[in-house]
Amino acid sequence: MKDSDSIRCIARILYPFMLLFGCYIIIFGDVSPGGGFQGGVILATARLVTLYIPEKADIDVEIFNLAEKLLFLLLLLLGLLSLFTVGGLFTNVLSAELPHEIRRWFLVILNLAIGIKVSSGLTLIFTQFVKEGE
Amino acid sequence: MIKKIRTPLLIIMLIFIFLFSLSGIPGILEEEPDSTIGDLVIERGYSDTSSKNLVAAILLDYRLFDSVFEAAILLISAAGVLYMTRLPLKDKTMKGGKGNERQ
């Protein structure tokens, strides 16, 4: 199944569209259905498609590990930041008097952080499982 | 003696916990309340969090504390998978001593 030409061709066509769709789901997470977790899982599923593309099959796991750790620290920091600006833990950093168009950027940044974190974590898990199976 | 009554005691305890948790669900033992948390989120979600997607409003503002630790669970599981799979294959028997060193 791995050597099939048609699957390899379809995977090559599908791969950029899966990345694009995952990024769309993450960035528009606060105005349409979706969000960081869902888009991150779609991005990680794109990694499974690359197993059919021989030129892209080898990736370094360490950078995903590092990205996941740093982004988790960033998430904690973003949650703690609202204590100093608004006065309550784990809410929006920007105060409620600002217009909605500015306040929504906090949600976009948070969605991006969660999305990249989830996608790197699941990519790491998938890659390690595939390596273990071989 | 204790071993004989342990299993029925556990089953009775589980049944009591089940019945006790039933009493917290509205509409089964209690009458339904007039307004729920869902009505509050629909009414005030956009003005509080400026998110048009109310699921994102709950996940990223009202319950951000839970979301952060949901991400922590994924971090821990990924770290566990990495720890289990990064050892070289012949050293996985965990004999202790030299063979156990990480790569």
Image (cartoon, grey):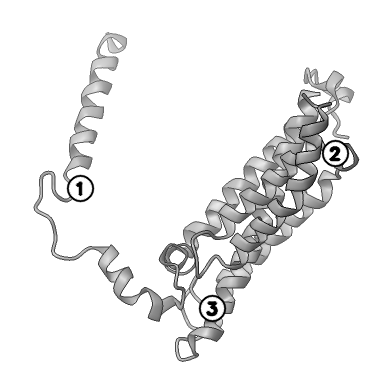
The residue lying toward the viewer, choosing from B35 and B80, is B35
Frontmost of labels 3 and 1 is: 3
* Secondary structure under the numbered disc 2 in the rendered image: loop
Give the quarter of the figure containing the N terminus of chain B: top left
- The answer to whether residue A30 is above or below residue A22 is below
Q: Amino acid at mark 2?
A: Ala
Per the rendering, the mark at residue A104 is 3
| Residue at x 13%, y 44% (from the top left corner) | B28
| Chain designation of label 1 | B
Q: Which residue is mark 2?
A: A57
C-beta proximity under 8 Å, tags 3 and 1: no
Q: Amino acid at mark 1?
A: Ile
Q: Which residue is mark 1?
A: B25
Frontmost of labels 1 and 2 is: 2
In three-dimensional space, the C-alpha distance between marks 3 and 1, rounded to whole angstroms, equals: 34 Å
On the image, the x and y values in percent for residue A35 come to: 55, 60
Give the quarter of the figure containing the C terminus of chain B: top right
Pointer 3 or 2: first along the chain:
2
On the image, the x and y values in percent for residue B76 come to: 63, 44
Q: Amino acid at mark 3?
A: Arg
| Residue at x 71%, y 53% (from the top left corner) | A17
- The answer to whether residue B78 is above or below residue A43 is above
Task: Left or right? Give the position of A125 relative to A75.
Answer: right
| Residue A116 can be seen in this image | yes
* Secondary structure under the numbered disc 3 in the rendered image: helix
- Same-subunit check for callouts 1 and 2: no
